[in-house]
Image: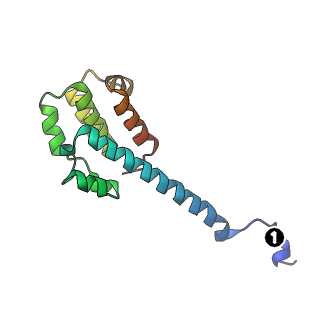
Amino acid sequence: MNTGDSSRSGAPRGRRGAVPVDAAARSIHKHREALFLEAWKRAIHCAGLQFFEIRSAHFLELAAHRDQLRPDHRAIRRALDRDLNAAEGLFLCALYGIYNADEGRRLAHRHYPDCRSREQMLDVFDAERRAILEALLNNYSDW
């Protein structure tokens, strides 16, 4: 039996066949990360720089990765303990929930116990906040 090139079906085999798929997957992942970062920056502008580990608006614009723009748990907790309106507070909870789902849920349940579902939460938001959350969720990959 001949195991040379004439026995191949024309389709690449082994690692060579996986390279284009891997490259395409990496490209899609990088694109989604860029879209997520853009939406995260919009979220920070909407929520307020003071709730994130950001030194300045200039730093925000220069940030190249979401890890440079982590939410500030302590600042968010303090703000939630004061009287934020529901849209502002729930938006902070939702954003923190993108960073850490369990803690975001705890914050929301503690400060907004009547808001039990995602639909109830979304009803509180204006179109801008809904659009930001939609972009974040559509382009999310594990933090």
Q: Which residue: 23% across, 51% down?
A: 57
Left or right of residue 76, residue 120 in this image: right
Q: Which residue is mark 1?
A: 8
Dot 1: element: loop
Q: Which residue: 38% across, 44% down?
A: 39
Q: Label 1: few (<14), some or many (≥20) within 10 Å? A: few
- Three-letter amino acid code at disc 1? Arg
Residue 38: percent from left, percent from top: 38, 48
Q: Is residue 12 above or below residue 138?
A: below
Left or right of residue 48, residue 131 in this image: right
Residue 92: percent from left, percent from top: 25, 36
Q: Which residue: 81% across, 70% down?
A: 8
Left or right of residue 110, residue 78 in this image: left
Residue farthest front in this picture = 58
Q: Which residue: 17% across, 44% down?
A: 50
133 or 45, nearer to the observer: 45
Residue 9: percent from left, percent from top: 82, 66
Quadrant for residue 16, please give it.
bottom right
Residue 66: percent from left, percent from top: 33, 53
Would you say residue 96 is visible in this rendering? no
Q: Is residue 84 above or below residue 141?
A: above
Colour mapping used in the image = rainbow
Left or right of residue 32, residue 90 in this image: left
55 or 79, nearer to the observer: 55
